[in-house]
Structures are given as C-alpha cells and as structure tokens.
Image (tube, rainbow, N blue to C red):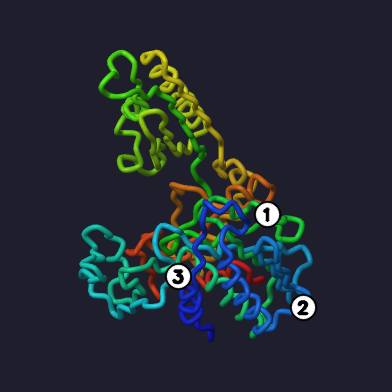
Amino acid sequence: MLNEDVTGRFLRYIAVDTASDETTGTSPSTAKQFDLANILIDELKAIGIPEEDIFFDAEHCYIYCKIKASAGTDSNAPKIGFISHMDTSPEAPGRCTSPRFIENYDGKDIALAGGKTLSPEYFPDLLLYKDRTLIVTDGTTLLGADDKAGIAEIMSMAEYYMKHPEEKHGEIWMAFTPDEEIGEGTKHFDLTRFGADYAYTVDGGRIGEISYENFNAAGATITITGRSVHPGDAYGKMINSIRIAEKIDSEIPDSERPETTRNHEGFFHLIEMSGTTEKTTMRYIIRDHDMDLFTEKKDRMRSICEKVKAENPGVIIDAEITDTYYNMISKIIPDNTAIIDRCTDAMKKVGIEPFTEPIRGGTDGATLSFMGLPCPNICSGGHNYHGVYEFICKESMEKITRLLIEITKQA
C-alpha cells in the first residue's frame, strides 16, 4: 500500500540534534531545533504541498501545514489534525547517528556500548517484537523516537496523499512544535492558524495505545532559610537548612513516590535539591489523575512545610506551588468520544489492537484540549523514551503510518 520509506525518513530526523533546554529562557529553548524545522519545510514542499498551505512561525519554530480536502469530499467532513514535537529530551545526548537494526529479533539480550544491555528481563515489551525488526541505539545516545517517529509517520501520511490524489479525505492539518520535553510545546501554539476541528498528538508509545487521560500536574519550589554559624560555636544557634530539607522529604511516604506507584496512582517526586547550611532549595513535581487527590497533595505539601517550620523555631520555609497542566479527560469524555471511536475503528481496520491507558505524565494534547482543541494522544511506536535504552519496531512505524491514513480517509 505504501511506497513511502518511513524508516528512512526517521533515520534522517534522528541524526539531527534537537534537544531542548529548560535553562535558556528562550522560545524555542535551543536554536538547533530550527535545523529539523528547515528540513521538514523543504520536505513538505518537495512532496507537493503548495507553499501557501505551509506556514512557519520563524520566531518560535512552529510549523503548520494543511492538506486540502480531496475533490468531491463531503463538505461536512471533520478537519482532522496531527501534531508531533521536534525536540528531544535533554536527559541523554540527542544526535543519534549510529542506530542499530536488529532483524528477526530472537527475544534475547541486546548488547549496547559501555557494558549496557537492553534485556527483556528489565524491558519485557521487547518480547512483543520477536521475529520483527528493532531499531535500537548504540548505547551512547537516545534514539529520538520521542517524537521523531511521530513526525516521520505524519510526513509519510502526507506524502501518501500527495501521491494518491484519488483517495478521498477531508481537510488534514499537521503541526510540528518545539520544546514539548520541557513543558513548553504549546507556549506559542496558534490555534487560529491551525484549522483542525480536533487533533491527535502522535506522541505515545507502544503500537495500539490511545490515551485521553493524563496527570494533573504542579511544580513545587521550597526554599528553606536556616542560620549558619561557626560549627564550633553552633550549640543552640545553628539551623542547618539541609537537615530541615531532609525532614520535609521524610514526611512523604515511600508509597507515594514515582518508583512505587503505577496506573492511576499519583506521587510526589523530589527532582532536585541543592543548598548550604544557610539556604537550601528543593524542587518537587506533584502528580495525580484525580483532581481531588491532586488538590489534597498540594495542600499536604503546604501542611508538611508548616509542620516542620513549627517544629524548628527560627527556620524560614517558603513553599511556592504552581499548576502546570490538567487531565484532559474532562474535555474528551463524554462530549468528544467520537474522536476516540474514529481512532479505534481505524486501528482495527489496519490490524492494530487498540488499548487505552492513562498517561503517567503530560502531553501537549492536554493543554490544547483545555485551549479548545480536543486532542487525545496516540501511539508512535517507541519504548523506553528519554534514555539510551530507547527502541522502536520498524513494522510498527509502517503500520502507524497506515493508521493515520485510515483515520483521515473518507468512505
């Protein structure tokens, strides 16, 4: 059915370093994201999309593109969008120039560089792909499937329609965005420019996944000001802010940490702590799918700080808690269930077994849903994102490309 080489496209994209960086304070956060954006714009033109249907926000590095509805298509057909992000996680080197192909995977360990092993003992999803072709890293970089697999699949879908004008489809919209990995993928997203009635972020994992639940999320910054004096004269005077920080963290049960929770269970996650005797800063992320439990966790964090402050006279504790995104389920269920049904029906037609599960994280689609564009998240096919153990199945990318075509086809 497809003449497009989604794998070749994917390999070109992952060779471009597009890691974002939350410390720069710019939008986009890194100039190198423009490198991939320019490649994509050239490819969109090369596959035959008219220049007037491509818009590039050259200030903020967003690409918007329209594929006109085919001739004779029902004018009431929905305008469907697909969105993927160009940046990769800064948690590992992002320029993957030495990916490896494991053909006819036998279900055994895969040796990576530096003594690392991609093993089904720790990553059991590997066994889903026995006898298929895996693409893995060499162990020194991430692969970049998050989300260059999604981009490759969307671009291959677009090329298919350019090569097959006889196929009936409604108006299709595509957007490629920066800085999703640092939570800023929708910061400058222009909904007036993006003309879809609804969209899908092609940014999920295992093939068949469709998600319309995600965490409610907040960030907490706790600043502790103690009292530093010479340790030889510290009796009754010193307040060690580092030890106060330890007391705050000890109030959180081990059962409410990321490493001990799953499915719909929320957590507190201490992601950074630095300081001196005089002053210490702690940074947490707070997550829960349930809004009531989310609110309770934020209130509890404030209460813990007040409790520790009361128990340690003279210490100053400031807790700043800021919401970052919310669970999109309220924007999908029950008013937009047809969006989910359309995707699951398309999956079944192309031989993909659909399944739903809550996202234990966030998605640009959640923010877009609250901005007025219903936008669940669907599979792009990768596994083990944000690190050197990342992998993807070649056949999954090919099938997901067919899925995007099926979603947009008109009978």
Structural distance between the alpha carbons of marks 1 and 3: 37 Å
Q: Are marks 1 and 3 in contact (CB under 8 Å)?
A: no
Q: Position of residue 248 (x, y in %)?
A: 36, 26
Task: Work out which quarter of the rendered image holds the C terminus and state it.
Answer: bottom right
State which quadrant residue 24 falls in: bottom right
The dot on residue 351 is 3
Structural distance between the alpha carbons of marks 3 and 2: 28 Å
Structural distance between the alpha carbons of marks 2 and 1: 33 Å
Which-is-in-front pick, marks 1 and 3?
1
Q: Position of residue 46 (x, y in %)?
A: 66, 84
State which quadrant residue 243 falls in: top left
Visible residue check, residue 38: yes
Residue at disc 2, secondary structure: loop
State which quadrant residue 231 falls in: top left
Amino acid type at mark 3: Gly
**Residue position marked by numbered label 1 in the rendering:** 188
For image coordinates 58% across by 73% down, the residue present is: 35
Amino acid type at mark 1: His
Residue 338 in the image: above or below residue 411: above
Amino acid type at mark 2: Ala
Visible residue check, residue 358: no
Q: Residues within 10 Å of mark 1 (few under 14, many from 20)?
A: some
Residue 67 in the image: above or below residue 302: below
Q: Position of residue 97 (x, y in %)?
A: 41, 77
Q: Decide which of 399, 193 is in the foreground and name it.
A: 193
Q: Are marks 3 and 2 in contact (CB under 8 Å)?
A: no
**Residue position marked by numbered label 2 in the rendering:** 71
Q: Using residue 404 as the reference point, say whether residue 195 is left or right of it.
A: right
Q: Decide which of 318, 287 is in the foreground and name it.
A: 318
Q: Using residue 154 as the reference point, say whether residue 242 is left or right of it.
A: left
Tell me which numbered mark, 3 or 2, is placed earlier along the sequence: 2
Q: Residues within 10 Å of mark 3 (few under 14, many from 20)?
A: few
